[in-house]
Amino acid sequence: MGVLNDFTEKAKGVFATATDKAKDVASVTKINVAIAGEQKEIDKNCLAIGQWFVSDYDGEIPDGVKDLVDAVNASKAKIAELEASKPVKAEEPAAEESAGKPCPICGEVSDSKFCPHCGAPMGD
């Protein structure tokens, strides 16, 4: 029986160690998730600062960011140019023109293959 008791005690020790390690991993994971959340907040706020700086800043642009601001402004100009070059969509045909044809059975007008009123085939 002594061997069985030794085995049980060793197993309890191993399980206790494994439990402690799992708690440590869970704790570290929780901390890492909190750090990632804070990093997202920093990124969001830095983005907002950058957008404000590029669009609303009236003072002299510092040399350290002048090239970046110029690149953003060039991209904005390119976007405006591309937007202007989009083909103009043709106007939608009037509802009367696309209303369809009358059903040969009940006279209901539809553009589907079957009459929505009586279910008859609308023909070709």
Image: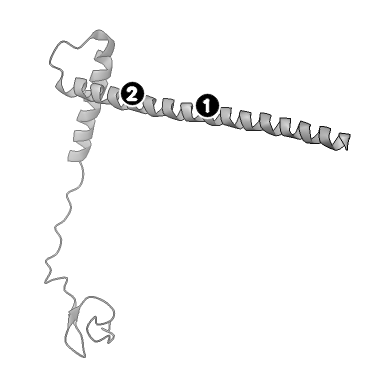
Q: Quadrant of the N terminus?
A: top right
Give the number of the disc on residue 28.
1
Residue 39 x/y as whole percent: 38, 25
**Residue 67 higher or lower than 79, as above or below:** above
Q: Which of label 2 and label 1 is nearer to you? A: 1
Circle nearer the N terminus (2, 1): 1
**Residue 64's image quarter?**
top left
Q: Quadrant of the C terminus?
A: bottom left
Residue 118 x/y as whole percent: 24, 87
Callout 2: SS: helix
**Left or right relative to 71: residue 56:** left
Q: Residue at x 19, y 12 (%)?
A: 61
The residue indicated by pointer 2 is 42
Q: Residue at x 27, y 85 (%)?
A: 119
Residue kind at label 2, given as amino acid type? Ile
The residues bearing labels 2 and 1 have C-alpha atoms spaced at a distance of: 21 Å
Look at the image and name its color scheme.
one colour
**Left or right relative to 14: residue 124:** left
Q: Residue at x 28, y 18 (%)?
A: 68
Nearer to me, 85 or 118: 118
**Residue 72's image quarter?**
top left
Residue kind at label 1, given as amino acid type? Val
Nearer to me, 15 or 51: 15
Q: Residue furthest bottom?
A: 105
Callout 1: SS: helix
Residue 2 x/y as whole percent: 87, 34
**Left or right relative to 88: residue 8:** right
**Residue 78's image quarter?**
top left
Q: Are marks 2 and 1 in contact (CB under 8 Å)?
A: no
